[in-house]
Image (tube, coloured by chain):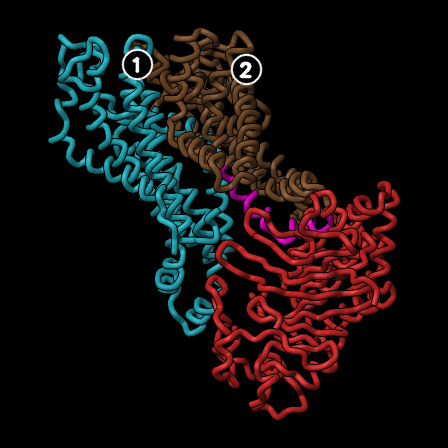
Amino acid sequence: MRPVPWLGVLGSLLIAVAVAVAVTAPWIAPAKPTQLDLRARLAPPAWVDGGKSNHLLGTDNVGRDVLSRVIWGSRISLTVGTAAALLGMLLGSTLGLLAGYFRGGVDAVISWLINVQLAFPFTLLAIFLLGTVGGGFAAVVVVLALATWVNYARIVRGQVLAIRERDYVLAARAVGVPTGRTLLRYILPNTAAPIVVVASFSTAQAILTQAALSFLGVGIDPSVPSWGAMLDEGRNYLQSAWWIAVFPGLAIALTVLGVNLLGDWLRDWLDPKSAA
Amino acid sequence: MSTFLVRRLFSACLVLLGVSLATFMVARSTGDPITLLVPSNATEAARTELRAHLGLDQPAPVQYALFLLHAVQGDLGSSFVYKQRVLDLVVNRLGATFELALAAFAIALVLGIGLGMLAALKRNTVVDFAITAFTMMGLAIPPFWLGLILIIVFAVRLQVLPVSGSDTAAAVILPAITLSLQSTARLARLLRSSMIEVLEADYIRTARAKGLMGRRVLWLHAFRNALIPLVTMAGLELGDLISSAVVIEAIFAWPGLGRLAITAVAQRDFPLLQGAVLVAAACFVTINLLVDWLYTRIDPRVVLR
Amino acid sequence: MSAPLLAMTNLQVRFGALHAVRGVSLAVGAGESLGIVGESGSGKSATMLSVMGLHDRRAAWVGADQLSVGGMDVLSAGEDQLRALRGGQVGMVFQDPLSALNPLFTAGFQIAEVLRRHRDLDRRQAREGAVALLAQVGVPDPKRRAGQYPHQFSGGMRQRVMIATALAGEPKLLIADEPTTALDVTVQAEIVRLIQDIQERSRLGLVWVTHDLALLARIADRVMVLYAGQVVEQAPAAELYARPRHPYTVGLLSTVARLDQPRGQRARAIPGQPPRLDLPIVGCAFAPRCPLRFERCLEAPPLIETGPDAAAACWRVETPA
């Protein structure tokens, strides 16, 4: 009876394409992403006057193939986005679980941490941290996890506060089930649905923020092809060679759109009440 | 009211304490700023003297305590690079960031509320689908990328609006639109769903059964209820706008806090960076205090605790 | 009897494929009280919302041979006429006063806006009128209570506020849609008495919709039983309770807990489910659940007269088992 969730299907499709491209990058990319073609610098896309058939989406200022760089760049966006969302999930869900279950002092401290984190102007914090600690894949993932853990912590805390008063949890406690077991066996499974939804939106947030940081020149080593870094390189050629910045931007938008659509659909599917 | 205020102020101070502690620790854990401040051929004596002058010879907890003590007196130290008071530098730039963030906030509120209402009232029509498509795109497009495209179209090709800077009133238009995009989309989505929920509420049926005008039912009875979740969200959005302004300022050469911070990172000017982060956090905390207060004005069920 | 306040003949309400009300006819005059009883989904609320023209025109299709309130044709009325009807000619009390009152406005405000809308009072007069109405429905300390919000009232007091908003337009007809269902048992009796008092004093026409047949014994002059969007029985209240003719009414009466019966016989629910309303109903709608069904039930029974002002839609009226 449920209507086909076309938007959810579209989202899954977009994500599937992005993942497939990232996995098969070495085989489907027409050139190495770092390979210079100095005779074809700033070549426009193939369908534009002066375009070259071997550079479908044109080349950048040092003659690197834009299509190949967009293909390879998917790897950074997807891995960083997923890793940051997962690390944030681990951190945030744990803290939210503890705050909601133990309440009192534990809750006060964790809620304080949440408020402190929310009060940080995140972009400044990220620039600050990456500027002082230095960039690199791990550092970026950790910094982005700092942006997402709050989402999980808040929602899990709220869920647990509600669930811990339910009869089956009270019963488990009454018969002496150890605390750790109560948390893992009785409470955590019931928070899974909102966690999954938050995870999808956090992935989207992480992908966008990672690109913004690369664009600002902090974070991932700019010699590794990434969509954010390509935008940064392309901004100096906006007038003469729009294609350098436009295609990686489109790639980001489509990927994030896919993740958001999937998240919307998951939310409606897991909680029909919220479907509006 | 007064106990509510005291409690909220107390918790706001605790939050700021946390922010200051975190920034302090990060700044101090990254090595000796002295090496950046003196020429590499400076004598050890000169280094020691500078260290003492900046108070960097004290143990870290003492440094933090001194920093706090000065901070509450409005002294956030001096910039390593500019040799000026950090507070002056930051406040100087804060105005520009505020101008940008508030302009974006105004756009987001007007457009977000308008689109959200329209989508809710025209639910499941072409209008609704178009607005949903717009908001989905708004959430997916990287704002800085949109900024680049707007520059190409309006400033470079059409030459109707200034590319960068903040010299004219028109200069705020492109950066504000760019900055507002995500907030507009989020607010519109939120209002659409909360409005749809409210329109199905029993008290709306009651209002209609009382024979009230359609406009009164919609704007007084429905809209005010739908506004409640929006107010909470709008406070977070304004904080988020101030934070996101950092990136947008970089594109449009907008002389705000973000530009200052990016320069400070590049030059390892920790007192300045610390000050910028702290002031921005203070703004966020203040905004949220205001939102809490506003909340109690709109929803009588919220008890001031 | 003078021209009825509310006259309805062959009402039909459809929500897409869902045929919720299938030919209901009724009439209510001044000072009369009609009880409508049925399970959820029997079409009783949909029927009452049609009287006010409150169905969403995009979602619901409403038709009738006649549907008039105080002589005005509701189906052909424009939005302005309907607004004068709602809250003016007809007051409506809903089931759950906590959700039916707007949480963001004071009790006084919600009553006063009806006064301003229908009685043309200015702001100050309306405020005073709201306080007077609160006093009239038995809210103690009405002046102070008028400035309070719905969440500050108890359930019973909240329903009194709801009743005050329904009375504010000086209606001739009062529709009460399960007004006591959401309340504590002790409070229910007070609200019933309050509505009865008001009805008798002002000679209002009253339609009381409920799923609780026992309750209507005290309130209604006449009772109408709805099943699957159709009237299955109607009779003066005393007659209906003494001699129920339709097996469904018999079933409803036997589910009513009666203290004078031995424990084991109390509260027997009728087995089975009401029919799906998105499919056509062949024959008698109740037949699948009916203990007395026979061959003739494959054909839909009309309302068959069983006495003065009494009828039941059942072949067993003619062919007793």
Residue B168 in the image: state x and y as whole percent. 54, 8
Residue receiving disc 2: B92
Q: Residue at x 53, y 32 (%)?
A: B115
Which residue does the image show at 61% across and 83% down from the upper left?
Answer: C250
Type of amino acid under label 2: Asn
Q: Residue furthest bottom?
A: C262
Q: Please indicate whether residue B249 sits to the left or right of residue A80 in the image.
A: right
Q: Is residue B28 visible?
A: no
What hue represents chain B?
A: brown
Could you tell me which chain the residue with mark 1 belongs to?
A
Amino acid type, callout 1? Trp
Q: What kind of secondary structure does the magenta stretch mostly adopt?
A: helix
| Chain C drawing hue | red
Q: Which mark is residue A242?
A: 1
Above or below C271: residue B114: above
Query: Element under label 1?
Result: loop
Choose top left, top right, bottom left or bottom right for residue B38. top left
Chain A takes which shade in the image? cyan
Query: Would you say C263 lies left or right of B254 here?
Result: right
Q: Quadrant of the N terminus of chain B?
A: top right
Which percent across, then down, holds residue C234?
Answer: 68, 75
- Residue B294 x %, y %: 65, 38
Question: Which residue occupies 63% across, 74% down?
Answer: C303
